[in-house]
Amino acid sequence: MTERPAQRTPNRQLAALIAEAGFSNAGLARRVDQLGLEHGLDLRYDKTSVTRWLRGQQPRGTTPALIAEVFTRRLGRRLTAQDLGLDACAPVYAGLEFAGSPEEAVDIVSGLWRKDSGSHAELRKIAFTPAGLVVPSRDWLIGRPDERVARAEAPRVPAQGRPAVPRPAAAAGTGGEPRRRSAAERGPGHRVTGGDIAALRSVSELFRTLDNAYGGGHARQALVRYLEHECEPMLRGVYGEQTGRRLFAAAADLTRLAGWTSYDIAAHGLAQRYFVQALRLSQAAGDRPYGAYVLVTMSRQAVYLGHGREAVQLARVAQQGVGTGAPPTVQALLHAAEARGHAVLGEVRACTASLVRAERALEAVRSGDEVPHWARFFDEAQLADEFGHCHRDLQQFRAAAQHAERSLQLRGPGYARSRLLCKVVLATARLGLGELDQACSLAAEAAGQAAEMRSVRAVEYVKDFERRLEPYKDTAPVRGYRDRVAALG
């Protein structure tokens, strides 16, 4: 790696942190190299490189951010390149920071929205890192609530002492009614209203419906552009304390959904960053239960990627963060997420215990109980789906088939992707039970539905089933299955 010419001043900040962390020069270099590999970087630093940094040379590119992340992990507090006496740069970890203030959170997440463009292939190159889950979840759990989120309007200075000229009213429409201007048209200094927040909520429900029915890739870019052009100006607008909390809550929900749709197209590193920022926005909203829901979403992504231990930890942090006062539906959701992590790890007893807690919590729901809008999807159909997935992962195929069938019977048609994934779980269970004809018939239906949907996750479920078919590749049912799938292309 090329370094800049040496400065005259030794880097005492870096030296002090190396001593605090207990690193040797070689040990620090090795950790920077390892972190670089997580992001596809072949750095090859050594103890001599660290000696040069201590003498005042500045590493280029993303290296300062990598060094800062190494110390963040070691010391358990967020450190920046400047804290180490290094030049700032565009960090390779941009988006994984748990901001220290609501203002900083807005800066980070709006940067993500603006940079989220390009092809799916490019977005999938952004690295997911399990270690990047630790600091944000911990900071959310132990962090103090934000005391103030309100934003006051900056004073307008009249030109040359003249009174400020009032802004003109919105242009009238053809019917004489004032046209409601977008947040972008009104500029970053406009006052946020209850109508603005209601619009954010309605848009969130619209995109959630599209995602459930057609997959995350269907309207994901439209969602991100809406966040950039409508939500960001609101967050930089003028609002009081109560309105501000509601605004941050709506922004958190939309940002989590942007992460969820990114996860569904296999842009896992990008999704991870959206989830971390949604977690921080939920803290600014003062909405602890929603923060727990974001952690559960992160846990589900970890399960999908095979990181069972991290999935369990995230679910437990979520449970600890809301305590026992959360509504029963939320409690059920949290325990089911933990069960999925245990199932990936093959921990039968722990998985069963979590499933029992989830079932009991859902049974405690009473008619008329207030359920957060984001948790209403978690019903008997969803719980049966969780049971089916867990039993499949534990290779308890008869139980998996029973619960998957029940979920499909109860699940409404609007949840097309969930029904598809559950159908593949049922097909896998039938295969495990030796019922090859039924398994292939179910999977062929799912493959046809996946072909009509913009969901990499749906396609990967089908591919996982096909890998399980390999021992039976010469049988008539499998040949028939492959012929049906080939006809889809």
Image: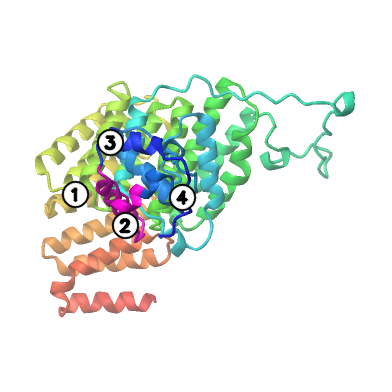
In this figure, which residue is indicated by the disc labeled 3?
A: 21
* First in residue order: circle 3 vs circle 2: 3
User: Comparing marks 4 and 2, which lies closer to the viewer?
Assistant: 4
* First in residue order: circle 3 vs circle 4: 4
- Residue at position x 40%, y 22% from top? 144
Whether residues under marks 3 and 1 lie with C-beta atoms below 8 angstroms apart, the answer is: no
Estimate the x, y position of residue 57 in percent, counting from the top left. Answer: 44, 48
For the N terminus, the image quarter is: bottom left
Element marked by disc 4:
loop
Which residues, given as a range, are shown in magenta? Answer: 24-51
Which numbered circle lies on residue 330? none
- What's the CA distance linking mark 3 and mark 4? 24 Å
**Number of numbered labels in the structure image:** 4
146 or 410: nearer the viewer: 146
Element marked by disc 1:
helix
User: Comparing marks 1 and 2, which lies closer to the viewer?
Assistant: 2
Estimate the x, y position of residue 425 in percent, counting from the top left. Answer: 23, 56
Tag 3: residue type?
Ala
Q: Residue 107, relative to residue 272: is it above or below?
A: above
Tag 2: residue type?
Leu
User: Comparing marks 3 and 1, which lies closer to the viewer?
Assistant: 3
In this figure, which residue is indicated by the disc labeled 2?
A: 37
Element marked by disc 3:
helix
Q: Residue 329, relative to residue 426: is it above or below?
A: above
- Residue at position x 62%, y 35% from top? 234
In this figure, which residue is indicated by the disc labeled 1?
A: 344
Whether residues under marks 3 and 4 lie with C-beta atoms below 8 angstroms apart, the answer is: no
Specify the quadrant of the image occupied by residue 279: top left
- What's the CA distance linking mark 3 and mark 1? 34 Å
